[in-house]
Image: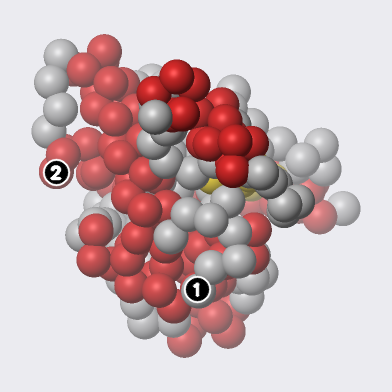
Amino acid sequence: MILRLIGSPQYGWISIADVKSTRADFLYKLTTAKAALQNVTLIPGETTYFFLDALAENFQLDRKILQYEYDKQTQREEGAFVPNTYKLPMGITEKELIKILLFQSSSQMKDLSMKIFGRYDEKKWFQYVAIASIIQKESASIKEMPLVSSVIYNRVKKGMKLQMDGTLNYGQYSHTPVTAKRIKEDRTLYNTYIYEGVIATPVCNVSFEAIRAAIFPAKTNYLYFVKSKKNNHNFSCNYTTHLRNIRHATK
């Protein structure tokens, strides 16, 4: 009867504090209290492996259950999340957290696809996400992304292996330096030094800027790029110039 006078109880998670409340206060809080929200940020280029680690720590959740729910709720091994800062309620379960993140990410991807293509083809979209994930790992800035994208398409067109270190920064190796030993020993399909073509599965979660670059590469003849002393990349069309750029970068 009191609730009918105050209003309807809220749906979802709310914070009613730890202090003792009278019955009237408790009922009042049920209708007016705000959700206890926690911010969590997924940065572009980060892998789901490390994002799930952060979610488990920030929300005091079970990491194994988070992985189980992720695997259960999506067929995408990687790239299903959209990098963003999410406000999520404390006390949320592993199942609900993954459900919310996947729903919000999927909605954003569909919206962008509709703006660009006028439709959403999930299979085709994630082919672009796979290319975008390489662009995300290799680019030093958003400005460079269409140029890196052009190198990927140009090399594939010529039948050249991509030979890009960023594809080996997958999963738990997201922050691991790529060494000559790793390139030689890693036999996964992420190793573009061994296998031809573009990786079938994204290597990380990607920004919309990287996806746009994958869809709209710059029109260039570039086949190579190397990091410069200014922390950007020097692009080149032939191997001789590429070697010269490498020498300048290492001096």
Q: Secondary structure at mark 1?
A: helix
> Closer to the camera: disc 1 or disc 2?
1
Q: Residue 10: which quarter of the image?
A: top left
Q: Residue 229 placed where, x, y %?
A: 82, 43
* Image side of residue 17 versus residue 249, left or right: left
17 over 109 or under it: above or below: below
Which residue is depicted at the point 28% across and 21% down? 111
Circle 1 residue = 63
Q: Residue 136 placed where, x, y %?
A: 51, 42
* Image side of residue 109 versus residue 139, left or right: left
Q: Residue 16: which quarter of the image?
A: top right
38 over 34 or under it: above or below: below
* Image side of residue 90 versus residue 79, left or right: right
How is the model colour-coded? secondary structure
- Residue furthest to the right in view is 251
> Disc 1 marks which amino acid?
Arg
**Marks 1/2: CA–CA distance:** 29 Å
Q: Secondary structure at mark 2?
A: helix
Circle 2 residue = 123
Which residue is depicted at the point 12% across and 33% down? 121
Which residue is depicted at the point 39% across and 29% down? 1
Instruction: Please state which of residues 88 and 178 is positioned toward the viewer in this rendering.
Output: 88
* Image side of residue 30 versus residue 212, left or right: right
Q: Residue 147 placed where, x, y %?
A: 49, 29
Q: Residue 21 placed where, x, y %?
A: 69, 46
> Disc 2 marks which amino acid?
Lys
First in residue order: circle 1 vs circle 2: 1
